[in-house]
Image (spheres, rainbow, N blue to C red):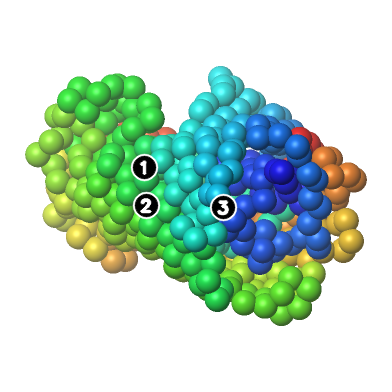
């Protein structure tokens, strides 16, 4: 007998969570504290079938007013969706089968499309935990906690779509997870059962450039503006990636409870273009530390992500820049353009708070990210998110959200972006209002 779990605020059906989390069964390793972070209770429906289908649709309209408009719309609407198909068999205490997830996007990405998000085989039991083989999320990603974990609505920085709608200062908005994590590459992933509140996870990904992330083979030049040798961050990739996670949780959902977790990523960095093969890049070394603290209907999540120097070029600028000249044509081989030896790939600090008022959930979040180009030159972003979400039924909910975004970019980042032929701005401020509707099925 399968079980299909519905949540009051449908947190596991928000857009940016992987389709692998849309479980249509009673999971052997279900994490009650995490699954109930802003949920007052669970509803379970018995499904008498080995095959099940579930997912969500999220319609949103955003109205944004920003200092640097350029070609960005003042308002935009989008329809985003996730669907998950799962086949499960059980035998002698073991569950095994396959799962496939699809994401759809329209509006925000002008040429809206559907993409295969996950596709894997799995084996699980109370004894071995859950093992996945195929296209799924990494173990470190599954164990990561940030401020957006308790947010409802569009989820601000956690949505992953801000760069589509906002003229950001160069690379200043760092995601709430490891920037270079690739959930869609083929991998082996394992998560242990929860024993006395503790659980661990491991995954191995041979090559992050799998799953059509790039349109060409590894021995061919990528058809993207990656001929800029020093612009390794957006074109480099990693091989033989090992990720790990560990978590500890205690308490009860209707009383004091807490969950603490650590996730880490380790891999070999590779240059992204054939003509930049002589330019070495840093190996992947990144981690996330997070916690969720709760008391009855109140939840607080805290998170810190450090991307280290992951995939940064080892070719450094040799001179200090005086200032950025927008009338000058910068090139990456200029001695004063590029990153300094103390540069990093970005850090993110975040906190989120949520409270449940019966069928209404209110949440607030603050995100701070910094990307260092030299010891004294940084690109920064500060994002404040306020949201409420009202559930009208198990399937239907509405939300409203306000985001305040402030970014700033140092002169070196501006010159670096110009040399890479990227659209960058110095400072930008924005206020965004989003209204939306979610339909779970």
Of mark 1 and mark 3, the one earlier in the sequence is 3
Please tell me the numbered disc located at residue 203: 2
Task: Classify 410 as above or below 196.
Answer: above
The residue lying toward the viewer, choosing from 89 and 185, is 89
Q: Position of residue 67 (x, y in %)?
A: 59, 44
Q: Residue at x 38, y 26 (%)?
A: 212
- Helix, strand or loop at label 3? It is loop
* SS type, badge 1: strand
Say if 408 sits above or below 295 in the image: above
| Badge 2 vs badge 1, beta-carbon distance below 8 Å | yes
Quadrant housing residue 235: top left
Label drawn at residue 187:
1
Nearer to me, 16 or 242: 242
Say which label, 2 or 3, has the lower sequence index: 3
Residue 314: numbered disc = none
Can residue 414 be seen here? The reply is no
* Mark 3 lies on residue: 93
Is residue 357 rendered to the left or right of residue 68?
Answer: right
420 or 4: which is nearer to us? 4
Going 56% across and 74% down the picture, which residue do you hit?
197
Q: Earlier in the sequence, mark 2 or mark 1?
A: 1
Measured as percent of width and height from the top left, residue 307 is found at 36, 58
Q: Residue 383: which quarter of the image?
A: bottom right
The N terminus sits in image quarter: top right
């Amino acid at each position: 007998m399968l079980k299909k779990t519905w949540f009051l605020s449908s947190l596991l059906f928000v857009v940016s969570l992987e389709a692998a989390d849309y479980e249509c069964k009673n999971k052997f390793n279900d994490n009650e504290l995490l699954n109930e972070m802003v949920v007052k209770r669970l509803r379970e429906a018995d499904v008498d079938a080995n095959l099940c289908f579930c997912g969500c649709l999220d319609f949103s309209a955003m109205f944004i007013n920003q200092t640097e408009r350029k070609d960005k719309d003042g308002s935009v609407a989008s329809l985003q969706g996730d669907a998950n198909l799962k086949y499960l068999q059980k035998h002698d205490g073991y569950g095994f089968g396959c799962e496939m997830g699809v994401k759809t996007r329209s509006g925000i990405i002008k040429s809206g499309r559907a993409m295969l998000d996950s596709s894997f085989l799995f084996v699980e039991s109370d004894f071995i935990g859950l093992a996945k083989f195929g296209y799924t999320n990494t173990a470190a990603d599954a164990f990561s906690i940030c401020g957006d974990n308790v947010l409802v609505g569009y989820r601000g920085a956690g949505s992953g779509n801000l760069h589509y709608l906002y003229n950001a200062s160069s690379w200043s908005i760092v995601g709430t997870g490891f920037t270079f994590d690739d959930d869609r590459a083929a991998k082996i992933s394992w998560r242990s059962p929860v024993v006395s509140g503790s659980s661990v996870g491991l995954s191995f990904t041979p090559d992050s450039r799998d799953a059509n992330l790039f349109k060409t083979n590894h021995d061919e030049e990528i058809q993207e503006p990656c001929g800029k040798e020093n612009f390794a961050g957006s074109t480099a990739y990693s091989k033989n990636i090992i990720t790990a996670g560990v978590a500890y949780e205690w308490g009860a959902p209707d009383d004091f409870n807490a969950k603490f977790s650590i996730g880490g990523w380790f891999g070999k960095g590779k240059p992204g273009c054939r003509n930049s093969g002589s330019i070495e890049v840093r190996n992947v070394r990144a981690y996330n530390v997070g916690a969720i603290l709760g008391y009855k209907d109140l939840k607080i999540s805290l998170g810190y992500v450090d991307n280290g120097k992951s995939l940064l070029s080892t070719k450094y600028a040799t001179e200090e820049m005086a200032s950025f000249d927008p009338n000058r044509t910068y090139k990456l081989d200029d001695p004063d353009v590029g990153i300094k030896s103390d540069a990093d790939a970005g850090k993110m600090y975040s906190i989120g708070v949520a409270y449940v008022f019966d069928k209404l959930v209110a949440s607030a979040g603050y995100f701070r990210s910094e990307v260092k180009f030299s010891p004294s030159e940084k690109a920064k972003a500060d994002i404040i998110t306020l949201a409420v979400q009202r559930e009208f039924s198990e399937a239907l909910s509405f939300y409203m959200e306000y985001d305040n975004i402030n970014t700033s970019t140092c002169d070196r980042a501006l010159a670096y972006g110009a040399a890479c032929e990227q659209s960058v701005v110095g400072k930008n401020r924005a206020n965004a209002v989003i209204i939306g509707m979610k339909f779970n099925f």
